[in-house]
Image (cartoon, helix red, strand yellow):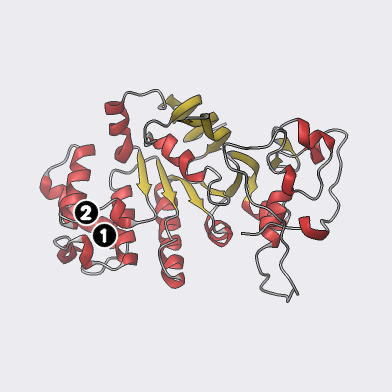
């Protein structure tokens, strides 16, 4: 079996507070293969972006990794010194942020930033680096790429800046790209273009992608597999088609029920009362049980681990523990989830 590009095992990330340690990511595990796109989806505060930041070594102090491990192509990277991790970023892991200006220095020309990044991580001349920068911008769909190298970030539109950031993330041919809400700040038509571009460029290079988003439409369009997060944990993971069409965890079923169907009219979207718990007050047992229509005694006492519920799908839900219990169709106030 081919070794995954990224392997995360039992990752825990915490932030010290006056009331004790706040655990923002609690026992997250997943793999991503070469050329595969894993989408991570969930509500704000679920721990999606913190997971990505932990992988790339960008947790802001006093936050820190409390446990688990992160391996890139089999080599552990979560214990690397800061200088060694800096060399991994950019060369072996590329990053695409929600706001392109987070990645681009407004005081430097686009070409200078691309050339500097290429030369930092490769052993080529300035002239060759400039030629590669032009080729990358062309691949990213920037017209008149050679002339635009001398432009500043503010001279590009939001969509064009995100194309530049994608070129920047790929300029050293990384093994992994982490895309954190890469289309949120863009209008719908530009979103579709960026999604298609990211998918095409990464597939052509065999680059693994961790796509972090709250938009199930983006997940359905781009991802091969999806991991659904809730209160710092993955509650369901599987092939995107299976999870979208036949979700198993009650939270995932709620997420899908909150999306308006295209082919049919429904009188009302499903929802459940309440909201995701504060990370300082996560309930005992299953974190979702106060909002779940299928809760029984075990849900309030024991935290479920991920269980195999289909050929390639796992869900952290006691409904699927032996003896296996098939969930009834949700009814009443607990039928779905408000987003």
Depth check, front residue: 105 or 73: 105
Asked if 231 appears above or below 10 in the picture, the reply is below
Residue 252 shown left or right of residue 171 in the figure: right
The residue under the point 45% across, 51% down is 203
Q: Give the quadrant of residue 181.
A: bottom left
Q: Give the quadrant of residue 329.
A: bottom right
Q: Which residue is mark 2?
A: 133
- Expressed as whole percent of the image width and height from the top left, the position of residue 312 reads 69, 42
Neighbourhood count class around disc 2 (C-alpha, 10 Å): few under 14, some 14–19, many 20 upward:
many
Label 2 and label 1: CA atoms lie apart by: 6 Å
Which quadrant of the rendered structure holds the C terminus?
Answer: bottom right
- Expressed as whole percent of the image width and height from the top left, the position of residue 81 reads 32, 23
Judged from the image, the secondary structure of the residue bearing numbered disc 2 is: helix
The residue under the point 42% across, 39% down is 53
- Expressed as whole percent of the image width and height from the top left, the position of residue 92 reads 35, 37
Dot label at residue 260: none
> Residues at badges 2 and 1 in contact (C-beta under 8 Å)?
yes
Judged from the image, the secondary structure of the residue bearing numbered disc 1 is: helix
Neighbourhood count class around disc 1 (C-alpha, 10 Å): few under 14, some 14–19, many 20 upward:
many
Residue 305 shown left or right of residue 136 in the figure: right
Q: Which residue is mark 1?
A: 137
Residue lying farthest to the front in this orientation: 18
Residue 116 shown left or right of residue 142 in the figure: left
- Expressed as whole percent of the image width and height from the top left, the position of residue 6 reads 48, 35
């Amino acid at each position: 079996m081919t070794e995954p590009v990224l392997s995360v095992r039992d990752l825990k990330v915490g932030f010290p507070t006056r009331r004790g340690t706040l655990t923002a990511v609690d026992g997250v595990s997943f793999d991503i293969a070469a050329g595969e796109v894993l989408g991570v989806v969930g509500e704000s505060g679920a721990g999606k972006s913190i997971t990505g930041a932990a992988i790339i070594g960008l947790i802001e102090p006093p936050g820190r990794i409390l446990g688990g491990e992160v391996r890139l192509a089999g080599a552990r990277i979560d214990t690397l010194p800061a200088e060694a991790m800096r060399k991994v970023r950019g060369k072996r892991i590329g990053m695409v942020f929600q706001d392109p200006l987070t990645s681009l220095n407004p005081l430097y020309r686009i070409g200078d930033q691309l050339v500097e990044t290429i030369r930092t991580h490769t052993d080529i001349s300035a002239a060759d680096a400039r030629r590669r920068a032009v080729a990358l911008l062309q691949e990213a769909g920037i017209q008149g790429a050679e002339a635009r190298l001398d432009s500043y970030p503010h001279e590009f539109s939001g969509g064009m800046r995100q194309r530049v950031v994608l070129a920047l993330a790929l300029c050293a041919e990384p093994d992994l790209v982490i895309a954190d809400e890469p289309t949120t700040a863009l209008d719908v038509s530009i979103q579709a273009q960026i999604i298609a571009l990211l998918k095409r460029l990464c597939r052509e290079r065999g680059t693994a992608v961790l796509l972090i988003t709250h938009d199930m439409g983006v997940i359905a369009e781009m991802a091969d597999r999806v991991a659904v997060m809730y209160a710092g944990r993955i509650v369901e993971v599987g092939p995107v088609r299976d999870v979208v069409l036949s979700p198993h965890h009650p939270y995932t079923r709620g997420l899908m029920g909150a999306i308006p169907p295209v082919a049919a009219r429904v009188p009302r979207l499903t929802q459940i009362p309440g909201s995701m718990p504060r990370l300082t007050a996560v309930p005992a047992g299953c974190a979702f049980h106060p909002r779940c229509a299928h809760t029984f005694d075990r849900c309030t006492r024991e935290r479920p681990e991920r269980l195999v519920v289909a050929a390639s799908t796992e869900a952290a839900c006691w409904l699927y523990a032996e003896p296996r219990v098939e969930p009834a169709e949700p009814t009443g106030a607990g039928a779905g989830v408000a987003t």
